[in-house]
Amino acid sequence: MPPDTVSSFTTCTGHDQHGRYPQVLTLADFQHNLAVVQARMAAACQRAGRDAASVRLLPVSKTQPSDRLRLAHAAGCRMLGENKVQEAWGKCEALQDLTDLRWSVIGHLQTNKAKLVARFASEFQALDSLRLAEALDRRLQAEGRALDVFVQVNTSGEASKYGLAPDAVPAFLQALPAMSALRVRGLMTLALFSHDSARVRQCFVRLRRLRDQLRQSAPAGMSLEELSMGMSGDFDIAIEEGATVVRVGQAIFGARAVPDQHYWPGLAGPVEVDGGSAQSLHPN
Ligand SMILES: *Cc1c(COP(=O)(O)O)cnc(C)c1O
């Protein structure tokens, strides 16, 4: 099977994307990539018998310069995902004139940076501790703002992944209604980085089942509609398993030069990649 078929996309997560996703320089490049991603999303919805409108695309613009983000906005993107809050804030300031552009912070956040998120983000997808929830709520109350949040769950069991263990989530949710500036939307996860699509799929299934269970016990008024799961290499599988938000960077913006360890510091490298491609992940 040739390497660039759709099925090879579905079995390669996170790493190893260089060459697969060429750089994006013009508005036409963006429009093209968005159309390709949307077609993959629509095809996955169709396979799963789901309505295409039930899945939101969150373009992830980390490492991309602000002028590239302007192109994404011109191509129709109205919310962008950034992993690091400092980087997101810099871009938010540089793009202040785009008044309808909103920001989703999708990466691990230290409690001492809650203030910054409270200032400008519309959505935060990596909520994983009570201390952080309390800090965010306090800062949001002070700003007179509210924030959509997703609870991050570690569905792969890897020590390198952030997020709560699945069995810690029920008690965690019980504490959240006290923090009225946080609007709990659902759960978020990063799947195992693996070429083994069955094991990747297992992570998504785990998140969906957890959400379905939690719906029985969740505090009143907490809907838990959303499942944020799936990235460039695996969003097709995630949609088949119920994703309502897919976070897609490289398939829209082109391959990143910055290695993924920069964003997922504990990451030792791909779990099961063939020798050759693993090399490039250890530039130092
Ligand atoms: C970078 C990132 C993504 C997108 O990854 P791509 O491989 O570029 O699609 C998704 N989720 C999180 C948390 C990220 O940091």
Image (cartoon, rainbow, N blue to C red):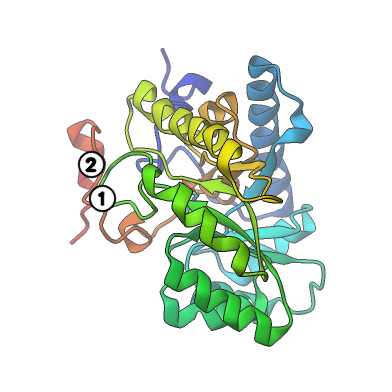
Secondary structure of the residue carrying numbered label 1? loop
Instruction: Name the residue carrying label 2.
Output: 278
Q: Residue 100 in the image: x percent, y percent?
A: 82, 67
- Residue 176: which quarter of the image? bottom right
Measuring 71% from the left and 51% from the top, which residue is drawn there? 221
Left or right of 46 in this view: 281: left
Instruction: Identify the residue position indicated by label 1 in the image.
Output: 281
At which x and y percent is residue 130?
A: 45, 67
Instruction: Respond yes or no on whether mark 1 lies under 8 Å from ligand 1.
Output: no
- The residue nearer to you, when weighing 76 against 137, is 137
Do callouts 2 and 1 mark residues in contact (Cβ within 8 Å)?
A: yes
Number of callouts:
2
Q: Could you tell me the amino acid type at mark 2?
A: Ala
**Residue depicted at 58% across the width and 24% down the height:** 240
In three-dimensional space, the C-alpha distance between marks 2 and 1, rounded to whole angstroms, equals 6 Å
Q: Secondary structure at mark 2?
A: helix
Q: Residue 14, labelled with which disc?
A: none
